[in-house]
Amino acid sequence: GKPMLRMGDTGDWVGTFEGHKGAVWGVALNESATLAASGAADFTGKIWNAVTGEEVHSLQHNHIVKTVAFSHDSQYLVTGSNEKLVRVFDLNSEGKALESYAGHAGAVKRALFCRNEKCVISCADDKSMRLWDRGTGQEVSRVEFSSHPNGLELSKDGSILTVTYGNCTAFYDMETLTQLKEITIPTRVSSASLHPDKHIFVCGGEDFKMYKYDYITGNEIESFKGHFGPVHSVSFSPDGELYASGSEDGTLRLWQTTVGKTYGLWKCTEPTDLNNSTSNNSAANNTTANSAVSGVVAPVTPNNAAVSCPPVSSATAPVTPTPSANREVTAN
């Protein structure tokens, strides 16, 4: 019941939003990271000030809120719930529900603004994805699946929709909703994310693995374990340098798209560098001898480079970085 805010490049804890009285199912940040949204089992969607941690709005529903998403201008929030309804709230008018879309025959799993905010796209447990016209309030298009869709993501440029269902990751043209390609994954997949450059995508599901695929050819590039439970959510960072995965094992992991690339506090540490650092008793590298592996990315905090972020509210201490090609963050 406690949405948590962390630094995107390091995983360091910033603060925890306190106020929900039930499990949190969906979270979102607006584009400027000034507002956060969350949907929970206490039948509310909440808007938070992402800088101070204060609650701005509490949006009442009649059932569990599964998904929340901001419009580009942060004026509107779309929610989907177990009421089988999709709602749009105006955040400039005390969070009033302006629009409500009924038609799904199952709990709404995901909902997003699309087509320059003129439409809303949603998927639900009725094995369908539906497009709603905000001008008319009507369903204008529908896609049926063979199993329940779990993930829904719009590409950075708004042109491609990524959908996961069963063992498949599929991509659709956002303007026509025609399927561009469908790729079978070796497990039931819960979530997938397309790189901003649209040359690779990553996904994860029930077999604990993360998969990386070539978007153009559909060929698997690599798969790797790290989690100890099913993967429920994956997402690329806006710049495409990292992707995050959240799992049933209680951890969030950050992975480098290009392993070994210097990025923020991520630095490729070679054994020779470490030995020189140790022999010189240098304080510039905090990585110990037993944590350096050739070619592996070790998060390094240079001298005077600590990021100081005021906590949103009191919570557990920031997690110690894990020195490996991925960063593991445990949500206590």
Image: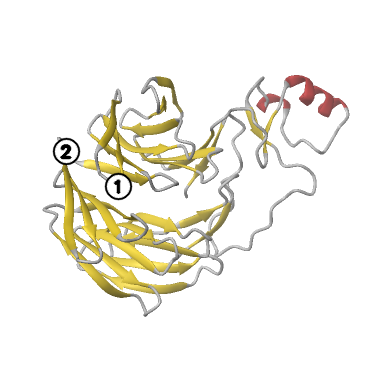
Residue 159 screen position, x and y as percent: 37, 44
Left or right of residue 71: residue 146: left
In this rendering, the label closer to the viewer, 1 or 2? 1
Alpha carbons under labels 1 and 2: distance apart: 19 Å
Q: Of the residues shown, which amino acid type is indicated by label 1?
A: Glu
Element carrying mark 1: loop
Q: Of the residues shown, which amino acid type is indicated by label 2?
A: Phe
Between 190 and 219, which is closer to the camera in this rendering? 219
Q: Which residue is mark 2?
A: 145
Residue 101 screen position, x and y as percent: 19, 63
Between 59 and 181, which is closer to the camera in this rendering? 181
Q: Quadrant of the N terminus?
A: bottom left
Residue 283 screen position, x and y as percent: 82, 38
**Does 94 sit above or below residue 318?**
below
Q: Which residue is mark 1?
A: 175
Left or right of residue 126: residue 194: right
The reply to whether callout 1 and callout 2 are in contact (CB within 8 Å) is: no
Left or right of residue 86: residue 105: left
Circle nearer the N terminus (1, 2): 2
Picture quadrant where residue 58 is located: bottom left
The local crowd at label 2, few if under 14, some if 14 to 19, many if 20 or more residues have their Cα within 10 Å, is few
Picture quadrant where residue 239 is located: top right
The residue sitting at the front extreme is 176
